[in-house]
Image (cartoon, rainbow, N blue to C red):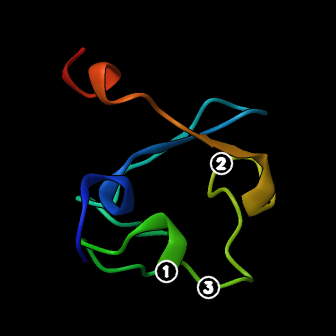
Amino acid sequence: MSGTAELSRYECRICWHVYDPAAGDEVWQIAPGTAFADLPESWHCPNCDAERHQFLPLDAEDRDA
């Protein structure tokens, strides 16, 4: 991984769940450190089952909020 974009957090437009690569996803058994771009195509939001295209990247300044 080479850049902060790969480790950006992404937010679901439906339920506002945030995928944080530092934490991974216990529901889908995604290991911590897995970038959003590296999630399997079958991955859906663990809260509302929305597909990946429903997620938007969070701005870098939002990370510290």
Q: Nearer the viewer, mark 2 or mark 3?
A: 3
Q: Quadrant of residue 2?
A: bottom left
Q: Which mark is residue 38?
A: 1
Q: Earlier in the sequence, mark 1 or mark 2?
A: 1
Nearer to the camera, 24 or 62: 62
- Furthest residue toward top: 65
Would you place residue 14 above or below residue 48 in this image?
above
Quarter the N terminus occupies: bottom left
Q: CA gap, disc 1 to disc 2?
A: 19 Å
Separation of disc 2 and disc 3 at Cα? 17 Å
Q: Secondary structure at mark 1?
A: helix
15 w.r.t. 5: above or below: above
The reply to whether residue 28 is in sight is: no
Which residue is tagged 2? 47
At a point 52% along the width and 72% down the height, the residue shown is: 37
- Which residue shows up at 26% across the image and 59% down it? 23
The answer to which quarter of the image holds residue 14 is: top right
Q: Position of residue 7 (x, y in %)?
A: 31, 58
Left or right of 53, for residue 64:
left
Disc nearest the viewer among 1 and 3 = 1
Q: Are marks 2 and 3 in contact (CB under 8 Å)?
A: no
Q: Residue at x 65, y 48 (%)?
A: 47
Q: Position of residue 49 (x, y in %)?
A: 78, 57
Q: In the image, residue 59 lies at what x, y percent?
A: 42, 28
Assess disc 2: are there few (<14), some (14-19) or many (≥20) residues with their C-alpha within 10 Å of its C-alpha. few
Q: Is residue 45 visible?
A: yes
Judging from the image, what secondary structure is the residue with disc 3 in?
Answer: loop
Contact, CB < 8 Å: mark 1 with mark 2?
Answer: no
Q: Mark 3 belongs to which amino acid?
A: Pro
Q: In this figure, which residue is indicated by the disc labeled 3?
A: 40
- Say whether residue 9 is left or right of residue 57: left
Question: Neighbour class for label 1 at 10 Å: few (<14), some, many (≥20)?
Answer: few
